[in-house]
Amino acid sequence: MSKIDFATKEAPQQAAEATKALVPRPANTSVTSYRPVLGDYIPSLAETRLPRISIVHGVGRLKEDFPVGGIVYGGQVLLYEARLGKKEASDPFEMVVLGWLPMRYVEKVRGGGRGMIVTSEEAVVEANGTLDYNEWVEKRAQGVRRFETLAEAVCLVKQPKMCENEPAQFPLIIEGERWALGIWGMKGTAFTNGAKTIFSSRHTGCCVDGYPACSWMASTESKPYTTEEGGQTDIPIPKFVPGKITTQKFCDYAVNLVTKGAAAAMHESKSAED
């Protein structure tokens, strides 16, 4: 062992070095420790992929798991069940439209396949298409393509009674009630009978102060439909009936939800309560 002079200023350092020399370093010990830095990144609404709200039709994947005429959230949760035989329909569910995504125009393809999607009426014309059904009937033999307007509403959906056992699907708590955020896309008869009903309310109806100012009771109803082959069938279409005027607090939450995100909206809502 080396000799240490405790009377010198270097004594503490010499003592530490001597101790290191006597005590071997344990095997498999890393010289540096790993300390990950995790940031609580909160994405904007534009960076999210929201669940879709869809009506179950007689064609498509949803009819394999849900009854025709029903309304499904995220392909997993049944929000509304239409009347079927002797079984009565469920109660309509409550929803609030926060706003609309930019309009798109979707080519209607026979058999329900995926067609071209464009973002302007000018692009429809450039693609040799038309939004006018009668014009398409007259010119389809010449190769004119049929397009439909697609309106996509960003909605808050209130947890229905039939979904009481699925609270995780409705994580947003507003004024003591559970809600979920989703997108409802409407085109064709759904656009005419659904989206236009809500559009009209923005001009002269319950939403003159803004779309979040009024809730809607959502369900479906059956409507006769003429197929491209000239046949007749019934299809489910959305039915929206004005619900109730929302509170100013609810509207403020809705604005923060769209502009700042759910986390900020929840924080500001709680701060207002305090």
Image (cartoon, rainbow, N blue to C red):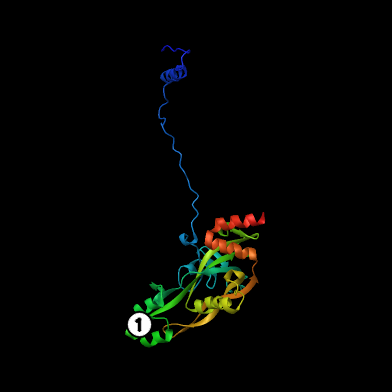
Badge 1: how crowded within 10 Å, few (<14), some, or many (20+)?
some
For the residue pair 47 and 194, the one nearer the viewer reads as 47
Q: Is residue 44 visible?
A: yes
Left or right: where 155 falls relative to 61: right
Left or right: where 254 falls relative to 125: right
Image quarter in which the C terminus is found = bottom right
Q: Residue at x 64, y 63 (%)?
A: 249
Left or right: where 109 falls relative to 221: left
- For the image, the number of numbered tags is 1
Q: Secondary structure at mark 1?
A: loop
Q: Is residue 80 visible?
A: no
Q: Residue at x 57, y 64 (%)?
A: 255
Inspect the image, locate mark 1, and give the three-letter code of the amino acid beneath it.
Answer: Val
Residue 186 horizontal/vertical position (percent): 49, 73
Q: Which residue ends up furthest to the front in the rendered image? A: 9
Q: Which residue ends up furthest to the left in the rendered image? A: 142
For the residue pair 88 and 94, the one nearer the viewer reads as 94
For the residue pair 17 and 146, the one nearer the viewer reads as 17
The residue beneath circle 1 is: 144
Q: Based on the displayed image, in which of its 4 quarters is residue 209 positioned?
A: bottom right
Q: Which residue ends up furthest to the right in the rendered image? A: 274
Residue 137 horizontal/vertical position (percent): 39, 86
Residue 268 horizontal/vertical position (percent): 60, 56
Q: Residue at x 36, y 86 (%)?
A: 139
Residue 20 horizontal/vertical position (percent): 43, 21
Q: Based on the displayed image, in which of its 4 quarters is residue 140 positioned?
A: bottom left
Picture layout, residue 212 above or below residue 145: above
Picture layout, residue 104 above or below residue 32: below
